[in-house]
Amino acid sequence: MADCLEELAKKYTATKFCKIISTECIPKYPDANLPTILIYKDKQCVQTLVGIMPYGGKRTTPERKHCRHHSTIVL
């Protein structure tokens, strides 16, 4: 997933991508909730996506990731 997000960050340079270590922010954050993606627009969190299954599991691609986001919110 990290590779997919890095590729999307290169493609969509006007969009800010940030990553953090979950347990540095929330102690004992469950691995089952990773990745957790927070989508912000105008300083408001407009969507939270939890886990990798919505993107095809471990076989996810940048295209699948983009399609999932594009259908819910414009990046």
Image (spheres, rainbow, N blue to C red):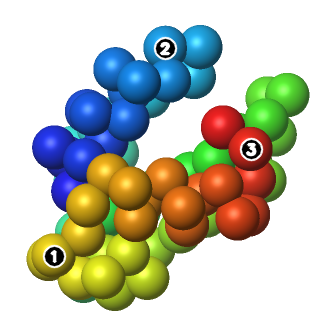
Q: Which residue is mark 1?
A: 59
Q: Is residue 63 above or below residue 40?
A: below
Alpha carbons under labels 3 and 1: distance apart: 23 Å
* Residue at x 85%, y 28% (from the top left corner): 42
Q: On the picture, is 1 further left or further right than 19?
A: left
Q: Position of residue 39 (x, y in %)?
A: 63, 47
Screen quadrant of the C terminus: top right
The number of numbered badges drawn on the structure is 3
Q: Secondary structure at mark 2?
A: loop
- What residue sits 74% from the left and 44% below the top? 74
Sooner in the amino-acid sequence: mark 3 or mark 2: 2
From the image, tell me which residue sits under label 2.
13
Q: Callout 1, which amino acid?
A: Arg
- Rendering coords of residue 13 (x, y %): 49, 14
Residue 59 drawn above or below residue 73: below
- Going by the picture, which residue comes out furthest to the top? 14
CA gap between label 2 and label 1 equals 25 Å
For the residue marked with disc 2, what is the amino acid?
Thr
Residue with the mark numbered 3? 74
Q: Tell me the amino acid under the disc marked 3.
A: Val
User: How many neighbours does mark 1 have within 10 angstroms: few (below 14), some (14-19), or many (20 or more)?
Assistant: few
Real-space Cα distance between discs 3 and 2?
14 Å
